[in-house]
Amino acid sequence: MSKNLENNLGGLEVELFESLKYKIVRRSIKIVFPEASDLRVLGAAVRLNAEELVTPILIGDEKKVVEIAHKRGFKISGLTIIDPKNYAKFDEMVAAFVERRKGKATEDQARTLLLDPNYFGTMLTYLGYADGMVSGAIHSTGETVRPALQIIKTKPGVSRTSGAFLMVRGREERYLFSDCAININPDAQALAEIAVESAKTAELFDIDPKVAMLSFSTKGSAASDEVTKVVEATKIAQQLAPEYEIDGELQFDAAYIASVAQQKAPDSKVAGKATVFVFPEIQSGNIGYKIAQRFGNFEAIGPILQGLNKPVSDLSRGCNEEDVYKLSIITAAQSLIK
């Protein structure tokens, strides 16, 4: 790994991004950035291009982007900048959008929507001109995710997308928490799909996926509709992906601590060894990852959107250049998942 890249990673576990770097470097993976005039995004795109990690496609007013780059001393020669208003294949894109929406958008509506940089960037990705998209620095989650759900859509067998957080502490600890960002209260089928997609995401980060389906009950210690949902989701997930070790329902301590697992779930192959934690609904997931982040000093990277046919990543509007840089590397690596 270059010293430059190591410095860029700051406090993050270096080995994690070293692994991702070697998966994507010099593979000409194209990532769309619909917020090219934002300094954080532009700075990250310049770095990614210089290190040959991704090939950025910048969406915005070319004159404005060049002016900002000049003021900041960014070298953007060789970068692709596309202004939707002047795009040579805009008519082709409009026709493809109308066809994809299957009667839910007229041609006039398509022309208006595709002037929006998120819709435009999503269509570039859908049409194969890019491998993924990173947005959200100045747009809300809805503005970023909605076009992806309408155009790119979810993979076969996946009914909805979900949001996972990679949790990293020091050089040894690395876990995945899901779904902490998208689905408010998924049913058993959706929860099972989230579990399977989370296992695939974990493998991307060289995490051996041992998936715990979390509850306030362990193996029948409590009875309620909430527990029944997790039990059913566990069975469905095991049927969907028998190649993965998935078990539940498990309380967090039984999933995480070996001595507790021995008492509460001695026959489980996951209890006490879990690396992927699937929360039963967004409320507990969101609270859980933030407790680990604030009390446990874990670095939370995400949300990483799962289940789409092509990766689209949603930044926080409070992000910095480093966040854009890191999430772009993750998005490029996600594009390699089949």
Image (tube, rainbow, N blue to C red):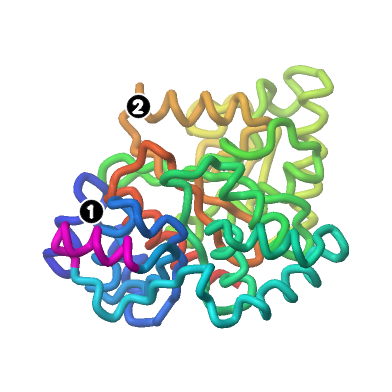
**Tag 1 residue:** 9
Q: Position of residue 310 (x, y in %)?
A: 60, 66
Q: Nearer the viewer, residue 17 or 183?
A: 183
Q: Is residue 18 above or below residue 210?
A: below
Q: Nearer the viewer, residue 290 or 41?
A: 41
Q: Which residue is mark 2?
A: 296
Q: Left or right: 257 with respect to 38?
A: right
x and y, in percent, of residue 61 in the image: 40, 64
Would you identify the image quadrant in which residue 167 lies? top left
Mark 1: few/some/many CA within 10 Å (<14, 14-19, 20+): some
Instruction: Identify the residue at image location x=73%, y=42%.
Output: 191
- In the picture, which quadrant includes the C terminus? bottom right
The question of residue 26 being in magenta is answered with no
Dot 1 or dot 2: first in sequence order is: 1
Task: Look at the image and tell me in which quarter the N terminus lies.
Answer: bottom left
Q: Residues within 10 Å of mark 2 (few under 14, many from 20)?
A: few
Say what secondary structure mark 2 lies in: loop
**Residue stretch in magenta:** 63-74
Q: Which one is nearer the viewer's eye here, 147 or 238?
A: 147
Q: Nearer the viewer, residue 84 or 234?
A: 84
Q: Is residue 166 visible?
A: no
Is residue 323 rendered to the left or right of residue 176?
Answer: left
Quarter assignment of residue 264 = top right
Residue 241, position as x, y percentages in the image? 72, 59
What secondary structure is the magenta-colored segment mainly? Answer: helix
Given the image, on which type of amino acid does mark 2 rest? Gly
What's the residue at 42%, 55% (across, down)?
A: 35
**Residue for point 87% across, 63% down:** 103
The residue lying at 61 percent from left, 59 percent from top is 119
Please determine whether, in this image, residue 220 is positioned above or below residue 106. Answer: above
The amino acid pointed to by label 1 is: Leu
